[in-house]
């Protein structure tokens, strides 16, 4: 993941880049670890664009990670290192 802003505001749309490019047939899957959560949750799946928009609903520190997946072969990369987004 790239271009994840370091800070954001509650209920304000925030955009970040999940990949610089996709090969045909590949998609991105994005997960979020919300403030206070113990488990990662799917934020978006089957993303074909390189940019994703996310609107955090509450204050706190969010973590975001993504992977690329070949839909035809059913195989995916590992997840990227988590990026941190502090929401006020």
Image: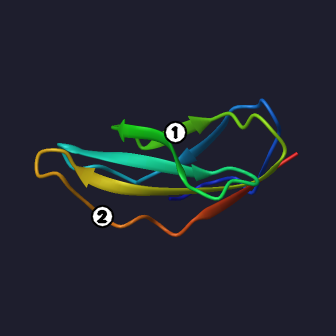
Residue at coordinates 51% horizontally, 50% vertically from top-left? 31
Q: Secondary structure at mark 2?
A: loop
Tell me the residue that label 1 is attached to: 52
The answer to which of marks 1 and 2 sits earlier in the sequence is 1
Q: Residue 71: x, y in percent?
A: 19, 45
Q: Residues within 10 Å of mark 1 (few under 14, many from 20)?
A: some
Left or right of residue 42, residue 23 in this image: left
Left or right of residue 61, residue 37 in this image: left
Tell me the residue that label 2 is attached to: 77
Q: Quadrant of the C terminus?
A: top right
> What separation in Å lies between label 1 and label 2 (alpha carbons)?
18 Å
Q: Residue 49: x, y in percent?
A: 39, 37
Whether residue 85 is situated above or below residue 78 in the rendered picture: above
Q: Residues within 10 Å of mark 2 (few under 14, many from 20)?
A: few
Q: Which of 19 and 57 lies nearest the eye of the viewer?
A: 57
Left or right of residue 73, residue 69 in this image: right
């Amino acid at each position: 993941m790239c271009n994840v802003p370091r800070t954001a505001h509650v209920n304000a749309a925030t955009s970040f880049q999940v990949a610089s490019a996709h090969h045909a047939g590949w998609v991105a899957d994005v997960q979020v670890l919300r403030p206070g959560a113990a488990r990662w949750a799917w934020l978006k799946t089957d993303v074909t664009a390189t940019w994703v928009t996310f609107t955090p609903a509450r204050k706190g520190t969010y973590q975001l990670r993504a992977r690329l997946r070949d839909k035809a072969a059913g195989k995916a990369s590992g997840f990227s290192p988590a990026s941190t987004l502090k929401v006020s």
